[in-house]
Amino acid sequence: MDLKGRDFLKLLDFTPEEITYLVDLAADLKDKKKKGILVDHMHRGKNIALIFEKTSTRTRCSFEVAAHDLGMGTTYLEPASSQIGKKESIADTARVLSGMFEGIEYRGFDQSIVEELAKYSKVPVWNGLTNEFHPTQMLADLLTIREHFGYLKGIKLAYMGDARYNMGNSYMVTCAKMGMHFVACTTEKYFPDAALVEQCKEIAAQTGGSITLTEDAMAGTKGADVVCTDVWVSMGEPDEVWAERIKELSPYQVNKTIMDNAGEQAIFMHCLPAFHDLNTKIGAEIAERFHITEMEVTDEVFESSQSLVFEEAENRMHTIKAVMAATLE
Ligand code: CP
Ligand code: NVA
């Protein structure tokens, strides 16, 4: 398998075999890390640029730690300290950075931006989250699911909440590619884009997976192996949408009733950050405005033994390391 020079923009661009190769490589790199086997010879002396137009804890730390482990240097560009999009176009930025760095990570808004960056870049571009997709998160989730169950094909994954944004779209694509059964449980308004649903159904028909969209949370989560969700309001969305999201998505909260309905085998996953208590500024503000103490997931589920969210978070680093190790020339 040779992925050298490839961009990593969305899983739609990769075959199931290529995705499996990246998950296998991540598992191997994780094993090496645990055993203290250094891999800093792999890309020693190279440098990568990390462009973040939205905030991050996991993705930024994963890229920085993984790059360091591979022997590379990193430069972090935050929105306020770079010219991107304000004084300099994406195309010009790509050509400038290509001359100094061996790889570029981009987190920001429209998928078209990261696609344009990749078009003009001479070095691999990695998508660290856009409005539409979060592909590095998907590799971490696949590794976590495979570590837990031992396989991916045939796994039933039920996604609760806002299914038409980066996490919902990405899970649907991932399940289709890997022969898994994806169920979006939400109101019709939050179903993924119809064209993407059709595309995923066609892929799933080839891999043995399936795509289901339902408003019935109990039917959708029945017997699910993985129950997952995401924040109800994503980065970059206006504050004004909180009221409607709470009203419309509360019936799709992941709570004990849902986990019991899924069954004892079910695990809970969340890309994080999650609103499961009042220990955040926004969580406390929302509690005051709307009189709710938990949102997309209850604290009981988040803290339960079925919850694998911190294993999932750690796997961000191992999988991002695999993406860089595989695609860098
Ligand atoms: N899951 C995830 O992407 O987290 P960050 O926003 O902290 O990077
Ligand atoms: N949907 C969330 C994911 C965060 C990792 C967001 O875009 O804010």
Image (cartoon, rainbow, N blue to C red):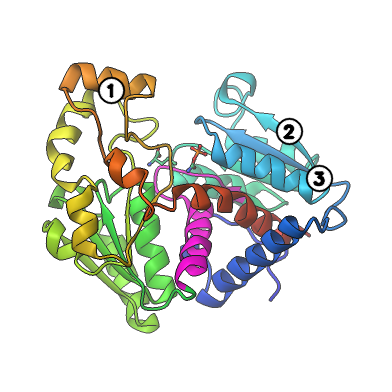
- Mark 2 nearby-residue class (10 Å; few <14, some 14–19, many ≥20): few
Q: Tell me if 5 is positioned left or right of 83 in this view.
A: right
110 is higher (above) or lower (below) than 244: below
Residue kind at label 2, given as amino acid type: Thr
- Residue at 22% over, 28% down: 241
Residue kind at label 1, given as amino acid type: Asp
- Tell me the CA gap for discs 1 and 2: 31 Å
- Residue at 71% over, 57% down: 34
- Depth check, front residue: 65 or 303: 303
Q: Which residue is mark 1?
A: 239
The circle on residue 171 is none
> Which circle's residue, 1 or 2, is located before the other in the chain?
2
The circle on residue 75 is 2
- Mark 1 nearby-residue class (10 Å; few <14, some 14–19, many ≥20): few
- Residue at 47% over, 46% down: 112
Ligand 2: which quarter?
A: top left
Q: Which residue is mark 3?
A: 72
